[in-house]
Amino acid sequence: MAAPDGVDRILEQWAAERPELDTGPMGLFGRIYRISRLSGDAVEATYAQHGITRADFDVLATLRRSGEPFALSPSGLTASLMLTSGGTTGRIDRLERAGLVRRSPDPADRRALLVSLTERGRDVVDAAVAAGLETQRRLASGLSDAERRRLDDLLRTLLASVTDPPG
């Protein structure tokens, strides 16, 4: 078992004050929250080394993993990113000014636009995704491959439970 952490101290305090409470879920979600915050900060710092934010990365990565020609409609981006159309427009505007994406008419529908990666945008997102994965790999290095796979399975099960709670 790992050494006690800050979450354990919080649970001990609750146990002293409210011993009748089962604080197990608090420990689980407290650790998930802390891991998310700390790892998110580390990945954000990695992306900053490539001149982009996490929000920028999300747009660029969505376009990159869409495959050739690395283009989507603004509404397709909005749906994929789960943002409002205004939020997506702001991100696209910023990335277009930076020369990482371009808007162009959709050849299949003259009334519509496509947002696509520029060559520079593709270079930036390819470098950022590799660097971000290396940061994540480093952060997870305290786990063996078997532990990581087991934790991944457990978190997948928990995510399904949180997404569609039983009862």
Image (spheres, rainbow, N blue to C red):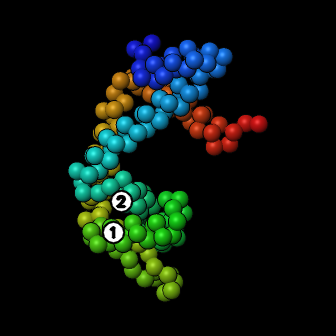
Q: Nearer the viewer, residue 110 or 3?
A: 3
Q: Position of residue 101 (x, y in %)?
A: 33, 70
Pointer 1: residues within 10 angstroms few (<14), some, or many (20+)?
A: few
Among the 4 quarters of the image, the one containing residue 38: top left
Name the residue located 37 percent from the left edge and 30 percent from the top edge.
140
What kind of residue is marked 2?
Answer: Asp
Quadrant where the image shows the C terminus: top right
As drawn, 116 above or below 166: below
- State how far apart marks 2 and 1 are (Cα): 8 Å
Find residue 6 and report its image quarter.
top left
- Pick whichever of labels 2 and 1 is earlier in the sequence: 2
Q: Are marks 2 and 1 in contact (CB under 8 Å)?
A: yes
Question: In the figure, is residue 155 to the left or right of 126?
Answer: right
* Residue that mark 2 sits on: 56
> Residue 71: horizontal and vertical position, in percent?
42, 69
Q: Is residue 119 visible?
A: no
In the displayed structure, does residue 164 sit left or right of residue 127?
right
Q: Residue at x 46, y 82 (%)?
A: 107
Residue displayed at 47% across by 36% down = 33
In the rendered view of the protein, which quadrant contains the N terminus?
top left
Label 1: element kind: helix
134 to 86, vertically: above or below: above
What amino acid type should be assigned to the residue bearing mark 1? Arg
Vertical placement of residue 99 versus 153, above or below: below
User: Is residue 23 visible to us here?
Assistant: yes
Farthest-out residue, right: 167
Q: Residue at x 58, y 38 (%)?
A: 159
Give the labeled residue for mark 1.
Answer: 94
